[in-house]
């Protein structure tokens, strides 16, 4: 009978999520695309990352496990979604075996697993997303609790000790949301005087911990604790603000009262009812296991059921939420750990109702069916384009197109190999075109793309945010000011600006300056970066560009930062970098463009000829010629 239940639960898990993926047309978001790119690079042997690109946290374990699928199916969304589905199955299975050990082998474990298999929108959404290690760390956390219960009830041996440490280490590397599970398992084992009293299993547990978390510790050792600085630094709000955010915003979304992108300002009667039912369920849950919980919290030597691990996991998360960004962030995905308590609350209450009489069995079955119907309604009462889209876009009623292939086709027909775009579009372009077209975005996850962007002959800019039409018009005016010919196109609701003549490719350029750092930022083709001299402008300060070889040039274009333009500069050229010829004296503007008769040159130098109590900055520089 247990295997029949398990088979049914696995089928429900798959059907629930496959139908959801069909509903959203197997849509990927930008963060999933980055995981896909990581898996692609791993399968090609190009890069072996420790973290999610561009961040010092969220380990790359999911990308490594997706790499074989990427090699098998090629770089497409199917491989990413199959991998996510496997993690979802692992999560539901671990929840099933944990519930059977703690709640018993009756129907309480079945109801618990059914809730995890067919959850509300938030858990459904994040159990088919391969980003951030959320569903994988939940699966690992439940396996850690299960193994802790096995050790506490059946004894510790060397194999169990090693695997306990290995799972804990992997969890630390993947996502520090595993810490509530580690706290619960550790306190439970301490209360049962297990593992710590056995030297050999304890040592092997520590060895497994070091092996599993080795990438985490090694990288933080070399980066001076970058992970901790990122997660603990820059917190906003007080402890009470964090807890109020967790209970007032995150919990209603977890239960399905609101979608993740909606501000929880008002409550529906149905939502209030769900909150009340789960609140009463928590009381029943705690009352049913009051003796076991009392023994644990009173440090009794008498055995407990292990149900305190569910409670300790939730309390551990609330502690983390109070003092870290897990509670301060508006995103409810950080509170996903609380499903480890919500599911057994559901299982215990319905299981107790089932055990009372034949009539109450029907009531328990109907209650479970009603809860699943409510969970369905949390998903399918919304537009199918919304559930997998960025929260800040949805709040502004801006929807990304589900199919960007017409955009890719137009870019490739125009010979564009590099674009600048919003993060949520740019990373999809990178992944779905298999990097035939690369996009620089903000934040920029992959540094190599900047080099390829600078080397490209033609570029495009894609605008999608509110006011995108104005943004595209502004870009057209900016490029036209330098004599760059442009085309514009509206496709899939996006505004695309194509360049025709951007001057010489900046791939082989080098630069130096009398003051300031990173002169190449003056021509990295990234409007969000700049070179700055770092002090007030003084006569004689200079910036020199090396074109890499002798070229025939006939024009210069410069984009300056507001307020950081020189009053007057002398433009000079040189064949060898030693002897310079003055070309003109000019007063630079924010968008300065200068054409002249063709002349051979390899070096172009700007020398300040007037003082100014402002810094000198260059956002972008263009050189025209042959």
Image (cartoon, rainbow, N blue to C red):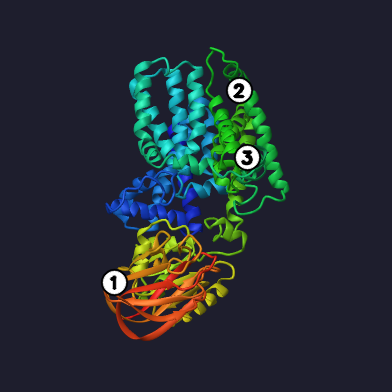
Q: Tell me where residue 598 appears, x and y as whole percent.
A: 33, 85
- Say which quarter of the image contains residue 500: bottom left
Point out the frontmost of discs 2 and 1: 1
Picture mark count = 3
Quadrant where the image shows the C terminus:
bottom left
Residue hosting label 3: 366
- Say which quarter of the image contains residue 526: bottom left
Which numbered disc flags the more N-terminal residue, 3 or 2?
A: 2
* Alpha carbons under labels 2 and 1: distance apart: 85 Å
Q: Tell me where residue 621 appears, x and y as whole percent.
A: 41, 72
- Say which quarter of the image contains residue 385: bottom right
Q: Tell me where residue 397 appears, x and y as whole percent.
A: 61, 63
Q: Tell me where residue 536 appears, x and y as whole percent.
A: 51, 63
Which numbered disc flags the more N-terminal residue, 2 or 1?
A: 2
Asked if residue 484 can be seen in this view, the reply is: no
* Relative to 312, residue 501 above or below: below
Could you say which disc has been placed on residue 528 in the image?
none
* Alpha carbons under labels 3 and 1: distance apart: 87 Å
Residue hosting label 2: 289
Label 2 close to label 1 by CB (< 8 Å): no
At 49% across and 66% down in the image, what residue appears? 537
Which numbered disc flags the more N-terminal residue, 3 or 1?
A: 3
* Relative to 176, residue 352 above or below: above
């Amino acid at each position: 009978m247990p295997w029949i239940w398990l088979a049914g639960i696995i089928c429900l898990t798959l059907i629930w999520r496959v139908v959801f993926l069909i509903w959203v047309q197997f849509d990927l978001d930008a963060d999933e695309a980055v995981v896909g790119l990581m898996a692609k690079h791993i399968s090609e042997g190009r890069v072996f990352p420790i973290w999610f690109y561009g961040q010092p946290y969220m380990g790359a374990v999911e990308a490594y496990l997706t790499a074989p699928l990427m090699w098998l199916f090629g770089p497409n969304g199917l491989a990413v979604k199959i991998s996510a589905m496997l993690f979802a199955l692992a999560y539901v299975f671990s929840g099933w075996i944990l519930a059977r050990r703690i709640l018993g082998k009756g129907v309480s474990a079945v109801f618990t697993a059914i809730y995890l298999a067919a959850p509300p929108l938030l858990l459904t959404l994040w159990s088919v997303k391969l980003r951030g290690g959320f569903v994988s760390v939940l699966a690992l956390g439940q396996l850690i609790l299960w193994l802790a219960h096995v050790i506490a009830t059946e004894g510790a041996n060397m194999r169990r000790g090693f695997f306990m440490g290995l799972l804990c280490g992997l969890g630390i590397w993947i996502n520090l949301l595993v810490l509530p599970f580690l706290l619960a398992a550790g306190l439970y084992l301490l209360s049962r005087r297990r593992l710590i009293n056995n030297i050999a299993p304890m040592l092997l547990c520590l060895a497994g911990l070091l092996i599993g978390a080795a990438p985490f510790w090694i990288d933080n050792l070399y980066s001076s604790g970058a992970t901790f600085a990122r997660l603990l630094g820059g917190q906003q709000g007080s402890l009470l603000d964090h807890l109020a955010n967790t209970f007032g915003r995150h919990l209603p979304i977890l239960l399905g009262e609101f979608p993740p992108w909606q501000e929880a300002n008002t409550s529906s009667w149905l939502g209030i009812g769900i909150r009340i039912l789960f609140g009463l369920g928590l009381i029943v849950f705690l009352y049913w296991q009051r003796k076991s919980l009392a023994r644990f919290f009173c440090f009794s030597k008498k055995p407990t059921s292990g149900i305190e691990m569910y409670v300790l996991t939730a309390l551990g998360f609330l502690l983390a939420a109070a003092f870290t960004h897990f509670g301060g962030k508006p995103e409810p995905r950080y509170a996903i750990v609380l499903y480890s308590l919500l599911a057994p609350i559901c299982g215990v209450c319905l299981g107790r109702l089932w055990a009372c009489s034949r009539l109450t069995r029907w009531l328990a079955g109907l209650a479970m069916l009603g809860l699943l119907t409510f969970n369905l309604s949390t998903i399918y009462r919304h537009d199918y384009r919304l559930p997998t889209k960025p929260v800040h876009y949805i709040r502004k009623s801006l929807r990304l197109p589900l199919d960007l292939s017409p955009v890719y086709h137009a870019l490739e027909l125009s010979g564009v190999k590099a674009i600048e775009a919003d993060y949520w579009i740019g990373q999809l372009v990178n992944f779905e075109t298999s990097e035939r077209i690369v996009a620089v975005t903000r934040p920029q996850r992959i540094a190599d793309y900047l080099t390829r962007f600078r080397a490209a002959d033609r570029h495009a800019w894609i605008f999608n945010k509110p006011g995108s039409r104005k943004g595209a018009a502004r870009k057209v005016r900016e490029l036209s000011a330098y004599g760059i010919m442009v085309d514009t196109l509206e496709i899939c609701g996006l505004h695309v600006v194509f360049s025709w003549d951007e001057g010489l490719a900046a791939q082989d350029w080098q630069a130096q300056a009398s003051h300031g750092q990173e002169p190449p930022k003056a021509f990295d083709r990234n409007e969000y970066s700049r070179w700055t001299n770092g002090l007030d402008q003084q006569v004689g300060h200079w910036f020199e560009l090396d074109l890499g070889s002798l070229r025939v040039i006939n024009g210069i274009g410069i984009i300056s930062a507001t307020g950081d333009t020189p009053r007057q500069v002398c433009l000079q050229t040189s064949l060898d970098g030693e002897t310079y010829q003055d070309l003109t004296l000019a007063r630079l503007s924010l968008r300065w463009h200068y054409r002249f008769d063709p002349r051979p040159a390899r070096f172009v130098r700007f020398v300040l000829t007037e003082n100014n109590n402002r810094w000198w900055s260059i956002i972008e520089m263009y050189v025209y010629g042959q």
